[in-house]
Image (cartoon, rainbow, N blue to C red):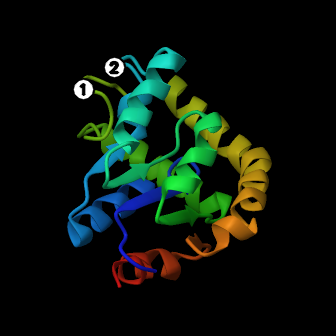
Amino acid sequence: MSAKKRILLLGSVASGKTALARKLSQALLLPIVHVDQIEFNSDLSKKNIDLIRSEIKTAVDRPEWILDGHGPLDLLPAHLKNADVVIYIDLPLWRNIVWLVKRQLKVLFKPRSEMPAGAQEWSWPHFKKMYLTLEKQHRLMNPELSRILNRPENQSKLVHIKTLNQLREAVGKVST
């Protein structure tokens, strides 16, 4: 892989996208675009879909970025085309559940910086929503996403992470 100036991170809820984005940002000195900051209001309701699309498009029109998530699915083809590297974190559901629980416990004490200011993620309804979203992603979205990412035009830029060791090695692999 040549110069990596635009990196797309894909994966389920609590798959490690943001943690990897931070490590890649430090290693490659690239700005992170946190899709959660763009998609959600401080009360965790979704913003207007046209506003979300516009803000994400503006962010990825820049020459350098790490896109932490993808936003509306109709933007995915453009993200795939424009990215120099596509990292798909495809860990087992049980791992994502453990990380989701861990994240929920952490936000009791400190809000996540990648969320909109004032967002309160520690509630039971929010946890339940994230859990159901995670389960649905694994059951319905991940198989379709794998099919899309395995198309010939995406293969040369795809880093498909299926294990914790591969996740740990991802920064080194993308940085070289």
Relative depth, front residue between 165 and 124:
165
CA separation in Å, label 2 and label 1: 6 Å
Tell me if 15 is positioned left or right of 77 in this view.
left
Q: Position of residue 91 (x, y in %)?
A: 61, 65
Say which element carries label 2: loop
Residue 121 position, x and y percent, is 39, 30
Does residue 127 appear to the left or right of 90 in the view shown?
left
The reply to whether residue 45 is visible in this rendering is no
Please state which amino acid type lies under the numbered disc 1: Ala
Which secondary structure, mark 1?
Answer: loop
* Residue occupying the point 69% across, 45% down: 137
Q: Residue at x 20, y 64 (%)?
A: 29
In the picture, the disc for residue 117 is 1
The answer to whether residue 27 is above or below residue 101 is: below
User: Looking at the image, which residue is at 48% across and 48% down?
Assistant: 101
Near-viewer residue (80 or 68): 80
Badge 2 vs badge 1, beta-carbon distance below 8 Å:
yes
Quarter-of-image position of residue 2: bottom left
Tag of residue 92: none
Q: In the rendered view, would you say 133 is above or below 30?
A: above
Q: Which residue is mark 2?
A: 42
